[in-house]
Image (tube, rainbow, N blue to C red):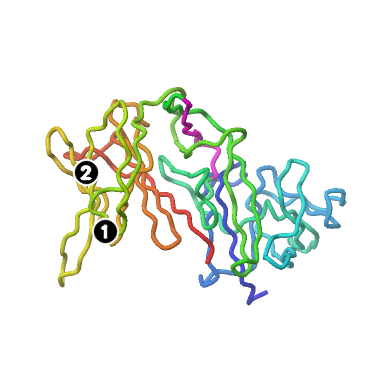
Amino acid sequence: MKNLCLFICFSGFLPALFAQPETEFAVRCPYPGEPDFDSTVVVTALSGLKMRDQPSFRGKTIALMPFAQKVKLLTLPRFNEPGDHIGEYSPDSIYGSWLKVRYGKQVGYAFSAYLGSTIKKMTADYHLLSANGSWCSDDSYVSKSYHFYGIFPEKDSTWVRRSVEPVFSVHWTALFGVANYGKIKVRGRQPLFLIASRMPMPEGEIPATNRRGYFSGNPAVEQPFARETIPASPWIFEIKPFLVENDHLMRHTRLTNRHTGQTQALVVEHFPPDQIVWEGDLDGDGVMDFILGRFQDIEMTWYLFLSKGAPPGQWFREVSRYIFSGCC
């Protein structure tokens, strides 16, 4: 099992019921090259995961493995020639397969949709999540002390925030070696994005501009910026290059207030965000907040900026980044 080429990725989040003091976690996807990578997996099922004496839901339960319990993976699922996972649906319509595992001194079978990799503590005030874009190495957020909301577009071009109960499914593939990835969903209609917040947020309509598109100054993209809608936004985004030590070229995403001409540098990186994903008043203070995006290689990064709590002399602060990418 030492040479097992496997990485297990989740893009979902669960309320955590965990007996130990640490109750807030973020499940992250380790890569095969990491020093601590092995065939250990972690139970991610809220109420624990049943180990059965045979690979079937009709099998006898021989142990209940608690949430966050580490389990040794002894087998991989089977795949067909294109690399698609050969499995079945659980009684609650989750697709997976039966994997042989060792829990303590016991050996049996567990359903693959509820086995993860590493659990880390979740500490931020806000977490931004995608319900539509994620497809491989994503973060899975787990905490019973957070409130979860979906941001939904309506047919009349308005946006609403609704409390949601996230669910997830985990799939296996052999297309890029052996890999495991997850898709986050909510019950019913899917939102554009999800917010996990320590504090409750009001539900209902959110003022939003509906504009999306790429910023001026992006050397790689010549797509026009989306048209502006009501309410109009005072913010102008652009990419600006500048030289640093040793004449090294850097870029930053700059925000300008069209009424006052004042500016704020938002992100300074080799490849800063170059598009606006969404713009609206998330924190309810009457100022438009926004999500910026950047696609580099096979990785998409979303940046959430809120106006509430911004440092002196600035309009916005970055409160969360969400990275989702392909398997490679």
- Tell me the magenta residue range: 142-155
Most common SS among magenta residues: strand
- Residue drawn where x is 44% and y is 53% of the image: 323
Query: How far across and down, in percent of the image, does residue 241 sit?
Result: 19, 58
Task: Quadrant for residue 166, please give it.
Answer: top right
Which label's residue is closer to the chain start, 2 or 1?
1
Q: Is residue 193 left or right of residue 20?
A: left
Q: Quadrant of residue 174?
A: bottom right
On the image, the x and y values in percent for residue 319 come to 35, 43
The percent position of residue 91, horizontal first and vertical second, equals 78, 42
Q: Which residue is mark 1?
A: 219
Q: Tag 1: residue type?
A: Pro
Of 185 and 128, nearer the camera is 185
Percent position of residue 240, x then y: 19, 54
Q: In this figure, which residue is indicated by the disc labeled 2?
A: 255
Residue at coordinates 19% horizontally, 69% vertically from top-left?
Answer: 248
- Quarter of the picture holding the N terminus: bottom right
Q: Quick check: 213 above or below 30?
A: above
Report the Cα–Cα distance between label 2 and label 1.
Answer: 18 Å
Tag 1 secondary structure: loop
Q: Nearer the viewer, residue 159 or 245?
A: 159
Residue 168 within the segment the image draws in magenta: no
Rate crowding at label 1 as few (under 14), some (14 to 19) or many (20 or more) other CA atoms within 10 Å. Answer: few
Q: Residues within 10 Å of mark 2 (few under 14, many from 20)?
A: many
**Up-down relation of residue 13 to residue 188 (above or below):** below
Amino acid type at mark 2: Leu
Element type where label 2 sits in the image: strand
